[in-house]
Image (cartoon, grey):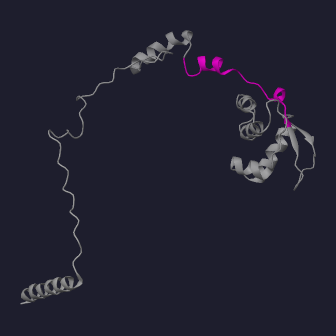
Amino acid sequence: MSGFLAGKVWQSALHPDLKPLAAALADIGNDDGTSIYPSVAYMAWLLGRSTRSVQDNLRKLRAQNVLKVVTDTKGGRLRTTEYRLVESALPTREEWRKHAITAGFRQKKNHAACNEKQRSLRLKPRSLRQETTNPSSPEPLRTAMEPPAEPRPHPPRPVPVAPLPPDEQKQLQSSFLAEMRRVAGSKAL
């Protein structure tokens, strides 16, 4: 598995539709771009695309000479095609460091011309340094619940009770039912 080669793919100027497939292929292969044995179904599952779109994108990568077929050009069921990813065929683009310096920031020559407009809009000029702020709260931090002054006592543990003999259980049950009938009868009146 080659994360190194996959990183090169992501940093290339390859078309955005082809980059995920090329990076996944590079991740499958070795660092030199060899031993890439993908199945179209696996790549479709991995990328969340249809098998037809994976086939089309493989065809486009072969047309750009980014992918070279090593063995079995026909492919098909149970006939795996081996590919080699050619790093030198990847289209190059400007380095990020060079791009990041100028992206979104005005150059000094334009800064003077924009000063008047910025003053009229009362905007702060953009700079490469970010302002630091001192975070403060309107109230000091407090806990949501103050701890009690004295510890709470533990609840008493239940005392194990020995079961009643069967005749006493029946007597207790019948007296309970008689009392329930009496209370229910007095409320019905």
Residue 172 versus residue 156 in the image, above or below: below
Residue 179 versus residue 16 in the image, above or below: below
Magenta residue check for 162: no
Relative to the observer, which residue lies in front, 94 or 45? Answer: 45
Relative image position of residue 157 (x, y in whole percent): 21, 58
In-image side of 35 versus 125 (left or right): right
In-image side of 141 versus 114 (left or right): left
Residue located at (13% from left, 88% from top): 178
Residue 168 lies in what quarter of the image? Answer: bottom left
Relative image position of residue 124 (x, y in whole percent): 42, 18
Q: Is residue 12 visible?
A: no
Q: Which residues are magenta?
A: 84-105
Residue located at (87% from left, 49% from top): 80
Residue located at (71% from left, 28% from top): 11
Relative image position of residue 57 (x, y in whole percent): 79, 44
Which quadrant is the N terminus positioned in?
A: top right
Relative image position of residue 48 (x, y in whole percent): 68, 50
Which quadrant is the C terminus positioned in?
A: bottom left
Relative to the observer, which residue lies in front, 178 or 141? Answer: 178
Magenta residue check for 104: yes
